[in-house]
Amino acid sequence: MTLKNHVRALTLVLVLALAATLGGCGKIREPYKDAPVTNVLNDKPADKITMPDGFSNLTTKCDHGNRIYVAFHGDGAYASIAVVPQDPSCR
C-alpha cells in the first residue's frame, strides 16, 4: 500500500467517524420541543410513608387538587404512580 492510499484510508476513516459522531447528536441540535409549562411552583415537601423491609415505600403529595401517590423500592429504577383526581383532602 502506498502512502497515498494510507492517507486516503485514514481520511475515509476520520470522515466516517466524524459523521457517526455528529449523527448521534440529533437531540443536542434539536430545538427545545418540550411541553409548555406554567409558572406555578409546587415545592412543598411530600409525605413519605416508610414500609417494613421487603415492601415498597410510598410518597404522597397534593398538586392542583389531585393527590399523587408514588410507590418506590429503595434506589430501584422503577416506581408506581397513582393519581386520585379532585381529592377532598387536597384543598
Image (cartoon, rainbow, N blue to C red):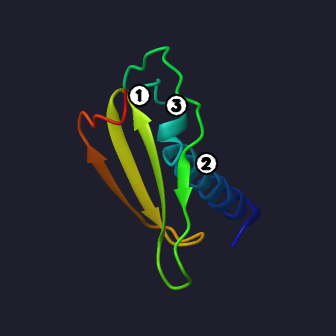
The amino acid marked with disc number 1 is Asp
Spot the residue most to the left.
Answer: 85
Query: x%, y% of residue 73?
Result: 51, 72
Q: Secondary structure at mark 3?
A: helix
The amino acid marked with disc number 3 is Arg
Q: Secondary structure at mark 1?
A: loop
Q: Which tag is nearer the camera, tag 3 or tag 1?
A: 1
| Front residue (pair 89, 1) | 89
Spot the residue most to the bottom.
Answer: 54
On-image quarter of the N terminus? bottom right
Q: Which tag is nearer the camera, tag 2 or tag 3?
A: 3
Give the residue pinned by disc 2. Answer: 18
Q: Secondary structure at mark 2?
A: helix
Query: x%, y% of residue 28?
Result: 55, 36
Give the residue pinned by disc 3. Answer: 29
Give the residue pinned by disc 1. Answer: 34
- Whether 31 is drawn above or below 23: the answer is above
Disc 1 to disc 2, C-alpha distance: 28 Å
Q: Residue at x 68, y 59 (%)?
A: 10
